[in-house]
Amino acid sequence: MSLSEPTRLLLELEPVAEANLNRHLGVAKEWMPHEYVPWSQGRDFADLGGQAWDPEQSKVSPIARTALEVNLLTEDNLPSYHREIERAFGRDGAWGTWVHRWTAEEGRHGICIRDYLLVTRAVDPVELERARMQTMEAGFDSGDKQLLNVFAYVSFQELATRISHRNTGRYTEDPIAEKLLARVAMDENLHMLFYRNLVTAALEVSPDAMMRAITDEVVGFQMPGSIIPSFVRKAALMAKAGIYDLRIHHDDVIWPLLRHWDVFAIEGLGAEGEQARDELSEFLTALDKQATRFEERRELARARELARK
């Protein structure tokens, strides 16, 4: 009985998964979410005889508030992400061990970010909870991506999430938030390395299919938080603030991975791989131009705003 292509790839790449799992376990440092939350700032809300939330209680700007909400709601959908990763990788061997370790580490992120937001009253807790319910009820659906597409997508997504967390922390101008989100970003970076190395290995064993998957995921990329209520508006605010925009996505997410994989120097591709690489090149040229136009419009808008003031 012949094996399906995903099963064959899982078996062939399991030594790579095991080696990178062991590398990850060797470098990942234990950390405690409760140590990053300023508990002394906490107090009761109205239903317990305390004070209801008011925007004046928040020490961060409205845009920083939006970015914190988006980052947390993205992390909240972990059950959906776990389902998607387990569907692709399975529960057996190194693959299953990684799935559950990754899920356990990701679970810390929502815990500590939410605790920080509620204790410091940085965001409206009622609106946050309503948005959490909507987001998790919608769930995240990858569209049954093929295994190689999963490798590519999570590589880009983990790096994008890392950068979004780091930039959000800096934008808050709160040393506590910056320290917390920098710690979360360190986890995301280690996760990215695991997936990035799987893509490297897959380019050796199945170069044409992996190149096709890379192109498809670059061209069709969407952040996992795209199902968050009012995501388009919130993402636009974050882009306007420079927290995460097209230039960052092009320069700091897509290109570092493409350079690491050396995709434009790989030799011996077949027709499928060459076509995918050509499409990737064309898309990157267009994305670069789009990012430049956005930067120009943003600078013009800032100049006009300064002139009005």
Image: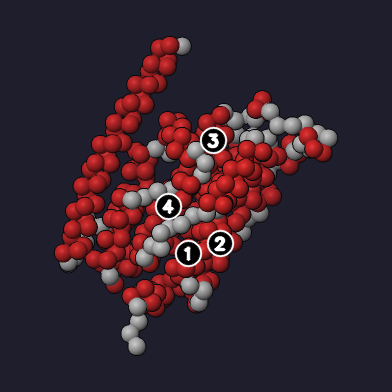
Q: Which one is nearer the viewer's eye here, 187 or 50?
A: 50
Specify the amino acid type for callout 2: Thr
For disc 3, the marked residue is 66
For image coordinates 38% across by 77% down, the residue present is 7
For disc 2, the marked residue is 103
Is 223 situated above or below 290?
below
SS for tag 3? helix
Disc marking residue 178: none
Specify the amino acid type for callout 1: Ile
Disc marking residue 85: 1
Marks 1 and 2 sit apart, C-alpha to C-alpha, by 9 Å
- Marks 3 and 2, the one that precedes in the sequence: 3
Marks 1 and 4 sit apart, C-alpha to C-alpha, by 13 Å
The image position of residue 110, as x and y in percent, is: 60, 50
Q: Is residue 123 left or right of residue 187?
A: right
Q: Are marks 1 and 2 in contact (CB under 8 Å)?
A: yes
For image coordinates 46% across by 11% down, the residue present is 309
- Marks 2 and 4, the one that precedes in the sequence: 2
Select label 3 or label 2 by which is in front: 3
For disc 4, the marked residue is 157
Marks 2 and 4 sit apart, C-alpha to C-alpha, by 15 Å
Q: Are marks 4 and 3 in contact (CB under 8 Å)?
A: no
- Marks 4 and 3, the one that precedes in the sequence: 3
- Marks 1 and 2, the one that precedes in the sequence: 1
